[in-house]
Each structure stands twice: as structure tokens, then as C-alpha cells.
Image (cartoon, grey):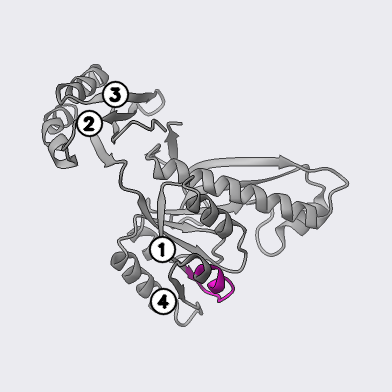
């Protein structure tokens, strides 16, 4: 990410001539300096996407910039958002009993490799409470049963509002969110899963993959929607295995890959590099 950028502008719209020039002129007219710019026109949908990072004069606020930019946005019928990069996203991490992704996220956050502030850790188990206490992060235990699921989700939503959460990270949280919750948090929840789906759904996927002699393990990070594990994909990766690897080897490699992929997705989202394009994403690296 451009370290001397102050604001990031994200744009999507129907593709038409003059958008790039008009956006650039508006930014420059406000005595701002563009330090990073990328755009993409999707020929299959006719949609245009743009990300611009720029420095701003001392004292400029988002509202001040937006007021001047609004006529351009209106003229070109732009869907747009502008973000202040000095403000880190407030992130809630949800986890069950597998802690590899949680531990990786906490380490990367503590070393400033992720632009997030962790507001709390939420879990349906008590396994990682001591880890949260060690980091000085509030821990909330929300055990889930079929009978209390809606009640606990209501508590979760209340915490999201109280903590002013921008992003929820499902770091191997092994509960399915209800359709209603997915709709209320649309675009604000990132999940990670192994890339055996849909081939090896259910319990012990790595054991089943080992039995089939798979030659790679992978992971997919995506936005959560009401369609289970079918939300817009942010990033994916794989690692190669061979005939000599045991089930434990597959699990270890899979967990490493899951941690790496989830962290990459959070980084892309927190740096405002992801735009939705229907059921797909546009990623400006």
C-alpha cells in the first residue's frame, strides 16, 4: 500500500468515457496528489471499477473532499466510497476450537502487518479465553444450541453495534450464521474454509482427502452470504502434498494455508482493495 496516501476512493459504475479523467481532475482540483491508481472495465457486464489512493492537504476531512467530488459522482452516476487510511478497521474475530487462524491474525495485528484493531474475540467455546486474556482483548463466550441460536445472534448483533465493528472475521468459527444475520451483516463478514469443498464436505475432510490421494490442499477466503460457503471469493491458495504425507501432514499444511489465505483476505479488505462485481470480486493489489 502506498504509505504516503491519506484517503482511498473506490468507484463502481456503468462503463463510459471520461470517468478516469473526471475523477483525476476532481482530486487534483482539491490540491490532492494521486499516489496509486488502478481501474478495470468488465467487458462481460459493462461495469467499471476504480481505486485511487491520494494524499490530501493538511486539515482536509472526508466530508470536505466528498462535497467537492459529489458533482462528478452525480454526473457519472457513480457508486463510490472514500476512506480515511488513518482509521484502522474495527474487527471482531469469531473462533471455535481450532486456533491457527486466530493466533496468526493476532500476531499479524500486533506487528502492524494488518490494518485492523481487534475489538473482541467471540467464541462458542472457552478454549481460547486465556489467549484473549493474554493479548488484553475482551473475550465473549456465546455457546450455541438449536434452542438459543437466534437469542445468541441477537446478542452478537448488539455487540457489533456497541463495539462499532466494521469487519467480522470467522477464523474457523464452526457455526452457520442464520440467513437473517448474513443479510444484516452483508459485505462485513469474511470466512475461511478448506478448498476441498464441495468435494469433501462434513466431518474429517482431510482424512477423506488423504484416502482419495489428493495432491494439493488449499483454502478459500470469501464474503459470507446466506448461501453457505458460496459468497464472493476474495483470495485462494494451495500447497502441494504427495504420497508420503500423512493425514497429520495434510492437516498441518491445510491449517498453514488457511491462516495465510485468511490474513491475505483481511489485508486486502482493510486496505480497501476489494470491490464487489455481482457474485465475483475485483481485487486491486
Which span of residues is magenta-colored? 122-132
Front: mark 1 or 3: 3
Indicate whether residue 126 is drawn in magenta: yes
The answer, for residue 142, to whether it is visible in the render is yes
Q: Earlier in the sequence, mark 1 or mark 2?
A: 2
Q: Note whether 212 is above or below 145 in the view shown.
A: above
Which residue, given by chain and number where applicable, does mark 1 sit on? Answer: 179
Q: Earlier in the sequence, mark 3 or mark 2?
A: 3
Residue 103's disc is: none
Q: Note whether 246 is above or below 121 in the view shown.
A: above
Residue ID at (15%, 26%): 30
Which residue, given by chain and number where applicable, does mark 4 sit on? Answer: 152
The quadrant holding residue 58 is: top left
Q: Earlier in the sequence, mark 4 or mark 1?
A: 4
Label 2–label 4 contact, CB within 8 A: no
Q: Earlier in the sequence, mark 1 or mark 3?
A: 3
The answer, for residue 232, to whether it is visible in the render is no
- Viewer-side residue, 196 vs 102: 102
Amino acid at each position: 500500500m502506498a504509505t504516503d496516501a491519506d484517503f482511498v476512493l473506490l468507484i463502481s459504475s456503468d462503463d463510459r468515457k471520461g470517468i478516469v479523467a473526471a475523477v483525476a481532475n476532481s482530486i487534483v482540483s482539491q490540491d490532492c496528489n494521486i499516489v496509486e491508481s488502478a481501474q478495470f472495465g468488465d467487458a462481460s457486464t459493462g461495469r467499471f471499477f476504480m481505486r485511487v489512493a491520494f494524499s490530501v492537504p493538511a486539515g482536509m476531512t472526508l466530508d470536505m473532499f466528498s462535497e467537492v467530488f459529489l458533482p462528478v459522482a452525480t454526473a457519472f452516476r457513480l457508486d463510490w466510497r472514500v476512506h480515511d487510511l488513518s482509521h484502522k478497521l474495527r474487527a471482531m474475530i469469531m473462533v471455535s476450537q481450532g486456533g491457527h487462524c486466530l493466533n496468526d491474525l493476532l500476531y499479524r495485528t500486533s506487528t502492524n502487518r494488518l490494518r485492523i484493531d481487534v475489538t473482541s474475540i467471540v467464541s462458542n467455546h472457552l478454549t481460547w479465553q486465556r489467549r484473549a486474556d493474554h493479548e488484553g482483548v475482551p473475550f465473549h463466550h456465546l455457546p450455541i444450541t438449536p434452542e438459543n441460536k437466534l437469542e445468541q445472534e441477537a446478542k452478537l448483533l448488539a455487540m457489533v453495534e456497541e463495539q462499532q465493528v466494521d469487519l467480522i472475521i470467522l477464523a474457523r468459527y464452526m457455526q452457520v450464521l442464520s440467513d437473517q444475520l448474513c443479510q444484516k451483516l452483508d459485505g462485513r463478514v469474511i470466512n475461511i474454509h478448506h478448498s476441498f469443498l464441495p468435494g469433501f464436505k462434513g466431518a474429517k475432510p482431510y482424512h477423506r482427502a488423504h484416502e482419495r490421494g489428493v495432491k494439493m490442499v488449499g483454502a478459500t477466503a470469501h464474503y459470507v452470504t446466506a448461501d453457505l460457503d458460496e459468497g464472493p471469493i476474495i483470495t485462494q491458495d494451495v500447497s502441494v502434498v504427495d504420497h508420503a504425507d500423512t493425514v497429520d501432514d495434510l492437516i498441518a499444511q491445510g491449517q498453514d494455508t488457511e491462516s495465510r489465505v485468511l490474513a491475505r483476505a483481511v489485508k486486502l479488505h482493510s486496505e480497501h482493495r476489494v470491490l464487489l462485481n455481482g457474485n465475483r470480486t475485483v481485487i486491486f493489489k
